[in-house]
Image (tube, helix red, strand yellow):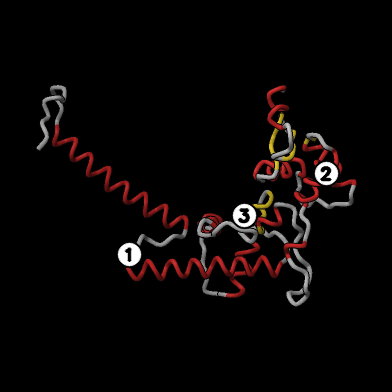
């Protein structure tokens, strides 16, 4: 047993241990309440954990299928209602946190489901400017050939030969007849430019192509 000589006099060790046990019991109650609120099942092990993981992966695939069939971003409520049409036994007392817990199980990629705008969820490629496909799967139009808004933004910067503000890029996109689906196109475009490795921020709300010659020299001058 560790020495307690370092403790100040007058400390009741047994009382502290009792309070520790009470706090641990309260913590277990809080965890169970949070699990009930989020709709998550208590932690399990072994075969049950594997089954739970498989069910979660199946649910993620169903969410992806719902969005593909809709062809546009949907709210959590809309996605939940579509899932309920497929499985009437589905019961999420609080859909939003349960839905987000499933999203954390995804791998990154163009079909990763993310929040595309306030209150709406869709595929990452939609958020990056790729419009939802309205063609049948049998039509021979490949995803690789579909030009996204970021592709056009890259071409705009290349043609201008200098950095542009986000507002200038959005204005040029609109001038070329590109429809931006985001409710706040400038903020959405700035987020996408920031996340893409093809672009680099050289000043507040101003971007240029990553790897453009003399970029480092320009940064030092500013």
Left or right: where does residue 109 sit relative to residue 93?
Answer: right
Q: Position of residue 215 (x, y in %)?
A: 71, 32
Disc 2 to disc 1, C-alpha distance: 54 Å
Disc 3 to disc 1, C-alpha distance: 29 Å
Q: Quadrant of the N terminus?
A: top left
Q: Front-most of 16 and 58?
A: 58
Q: In what element is the residue under mark 3?
A: strand
Report which residue position mark 2 lands on.
156
Q: Front-most of 170 and 144?
A: 144
Q: Which mark is residue 45?
A: 1
Q: In what element is the residue under mark 1?
A: loop
Mark 2 touches mark 1? (CB < 8 Å): no
Disc 3 to disc 2, C-alpha distance: 27 Å
Looking at the image, tell me whether mark 3 or mark 2 is earlier in sequence order: 3
Q: Is residue 221 above or below residue 189?
A: above
Q: What residue sits 59% from the left and 69% below the top?
A: 83
Looking at the image, tell me whether mark 2 or mark 1 is earlier in sequence order: 1
Report which residue position mark 3 lands on.
114
């Amino acid at each position: 047993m560790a020495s307690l000589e370092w403790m100040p006099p007058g400390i009741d060790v047994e009382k502290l241990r009792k309070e520790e046990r009470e706090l641990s019991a309260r913590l277990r109650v809080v965890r169970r309440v949070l699990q009930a609120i989020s709709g998550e099942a208590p932690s399990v092990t072994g075969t049950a954990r594997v089954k739970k993981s498989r069910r979660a992966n199946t649910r993620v695939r169903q969410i992806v299928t719902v969005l593909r069939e809709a062809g546009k971003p949907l709210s959590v409520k809309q996605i939940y209602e579509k899932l309920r049409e497929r499985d009437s036994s589905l019961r999420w007392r609080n859909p939003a946190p349960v839905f987000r817990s499933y999203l954390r199980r995804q791998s990154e990629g163009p079909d990763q489901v993310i929040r595309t705008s306030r209150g709406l969820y869709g595929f990452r490629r939609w958020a990056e400017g790729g419009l939802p496909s309205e063609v049948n799967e049998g039509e021979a139009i490949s995803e690789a050939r579909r030009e996204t808004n970021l592709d056009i933004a890259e071409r705009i910067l290349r043609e201008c030969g200098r950095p542009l503000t986000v507002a200038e890029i959005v204005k040029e996109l609109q001038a070329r007849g590109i429809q931006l689906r985001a409710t706040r196109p400038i903020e959405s475009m700035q987020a996408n430019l920031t996340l893409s490795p093809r672009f680099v921020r050289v000043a507040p709300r101003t971007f240029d192509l990553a790897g453009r010659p003399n970029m480092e020299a320009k940064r030092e001058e500013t």
